[in-house]
Image (cartoon, rainbow, N blue to C red):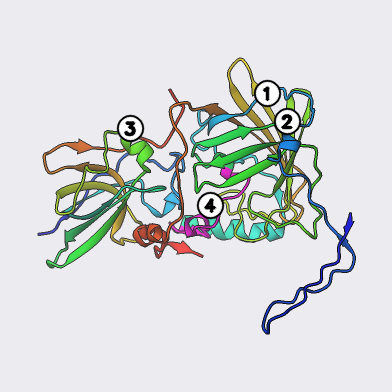
């Protein structure tokens, strides 16, 4: 079963603030994909947190995906904890994919095993 | 200047032998944290930058950039700018050195969209970016720049500041000449060894907003002065944290080894 879904393009996000330690232009932020799979690792770390998950490919082969996230400072503001994900959790992730099609994306949101959907606050401070 | 003669007599085979120095030896200034330096009588500073600051992005989401407007670039810069624009047109990224763990350096580190802690003492302002904990020190104790043949060049340069009325004027020079960029996102503008940045820093008492007016020159890469003004707001509900470009980071960030990178 194919576990990678293309979603409709979402609002252009290229103008959003740069927060990553790398160039965000490698991600196609004009569209999103959904990947479903089993968490192999969730790392709560600066300057990025990340999710690794095994995703079943078209021919049944399993591909390990990397989903890049904001630092914990911002994730906390969106309700995240270091214990939100654990290996083995079945999740569905929405992400902006790498332009090259490599198995990675910039995190947009996740559906947790209990159905809860968590996003990621924008990495901006002092805007209130 | 001091005259010092160093002579080490070795008593064991293989022990290091220091060469004899014959001439002037540079005497560094008193340390900025030396009690004697801190206690020296000085005019009271017109403001205290101590706090945590975050670049104001209200003007545009790209307010972290120092252009446009841009100055007239030299051929040495245009080569890189055109290459980065061509890469962008193909959906690729040119020379993402920060992603490869090279320091952002001044001026980009100031607006990297991470909080920056500033601690002002009578002798220096210590700036620590939340991004990779990049350390920048502005010495305000009256010292001069280190002689060019002694200074250790860096990505943040050597900053010497002096108060002029209600303004802290900071002169930063001695940058490295590699892996240091003035912009990103399709504008790969290199920063060279001749880069010099003068910042005029003011604190608006009414808005509690920090204003920094940048005047940047680098004759290798652009003509004349490149000016830009940035604003920073206090953020009192966050502290900077330990942030390092650890080996496991890029191993898990496929974007830093993507085929779309042109290094």
Viewer-nearest residue: B11 or A52: B11
- What residue appears at the point 74 percent right and 49 percent down from the top-left corner? B173
Q: Secondary structure at mark 2?
A: strand
Q: Is residue B94 magenta?
A: yes
Q: CA distance from mark 2 to mark 3?
A: 35 Å
The residue carrying mark 3 is A77
Can residue B63 be seen by looking at this rendering? no
Question: Residue B132 in the image: x percent, y percent?
Answer: 50, 49
Q: Determine contact: label 1, label 4, CB under 8 Å.
A: no
Check residue B168 in the rendering and tell me which mark sits there, or answer none.
Answer: 2
Which comes sooner in the sequence, label 2 or label 4?
2
Can residue A80 be seen by looking at this rendering? yes
Chain part drawn in magenta: B90-109
Q: Is residue B63 left or right of residue A30?
A: right
Label 1: chain letter = B
* Predominant SS of the magenta segment: loop
Q: CA distance from mark 2 to mark 4?
A: 33 Å
Q: Determine contact: label 2, label 1, CB under 8 Å.
A: yes
Q: Nearer the viewer, mark 2 or mark 4?
A: 2
Q: Is residue B186 left or right of residue B260?
A: right
Question: Residue B249 in the image: x percent, y percent?
Answer: 39, 57
Label 3: chain letter = A
Quadrant housing the N terminus of chain B: bottom right
The residue carrying mark 1 is B47
Mark 1 crowd level (few <14, some 14–19, many ≥20, 10 Å Cα): some
The residue carrying mark 4 is B186
């Amino acid at each position: 079963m194919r576990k990678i879904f293309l979603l409709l393009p979402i609002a252009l996000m290229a103008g959003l603030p740069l927060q990553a330690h790398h160039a965000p232009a490698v991600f196609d932020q004009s569209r999103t994909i959904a990947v479903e799979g089993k968490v192999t690792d969730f790392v709560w770390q600066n300057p990025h947190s990340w999710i690794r998950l095994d995703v079943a490919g078209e021919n049944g082969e399993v591909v390990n995906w990397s989903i890049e996230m904001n630092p914990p400072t911002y994730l906390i503001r969106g309700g995240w904890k270091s214990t939100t994900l654990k290996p083995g959790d079945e999740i569905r992730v929405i992400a902006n994919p790498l332009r090259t099609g490599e198995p990675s994306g910039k995190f947009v949101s996740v559906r947790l095993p209990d159905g809860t959907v968590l996003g990621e606050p924008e990495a901006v401070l002092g805007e209130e | 200047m001091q005259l010092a003669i160093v002579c080490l007599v070795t008593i064991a085979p293989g022990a290091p032998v220091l060469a004899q120095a014959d001439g002037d030896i540079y005497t560094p200034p008193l340390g900025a944290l030396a009690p004697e330096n801190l206690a020296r009588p000085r005019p009271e500073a017109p403001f205290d930058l101590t706090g945590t600051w975050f670049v104001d992005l209200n003007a545009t989401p790209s307010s972290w950039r120092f252009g446009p407007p841009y100055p007239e670039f030299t051929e040495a810069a245009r080569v890189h700018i055109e290459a980065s624009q061509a890469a962008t047109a193909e959906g690729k990224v040119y020379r993402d050195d920060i992603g490869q763990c090279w320091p952002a350096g001044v001026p980009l580190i100031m607006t990297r969209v991470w909080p920056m802690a500033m601690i002002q003492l009578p002798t220096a302002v210590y700036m620590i970016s939340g991004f990779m904990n990049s350390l920048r020190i502005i010495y305000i104790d009256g010292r001069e720049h280190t002689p060019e043949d002694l200074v250790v060049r860096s990505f943040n340069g050597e900053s010497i500041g002096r108060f002029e009325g209600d303004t802290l004027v900071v002169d930063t020079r001695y940058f490295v000449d590699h892996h240091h960029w003035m912009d990103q996102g399709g504008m790969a503008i290199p920063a060279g060894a001749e880069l010099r940045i003068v910042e005029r820093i003011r604190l608006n008492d009414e808005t509690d907003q920090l204003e920094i007016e940048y005047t940047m020159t680098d004759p290798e890469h652009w003509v004349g002065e490149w000016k830009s003004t940035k604003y920073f707001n206090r953020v009192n509900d966050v502290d900077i944290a330990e942030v390092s470009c650890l080996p496991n980071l890029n191993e898990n960030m496929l974007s830093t080894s993507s085929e779309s990178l042109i290094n």
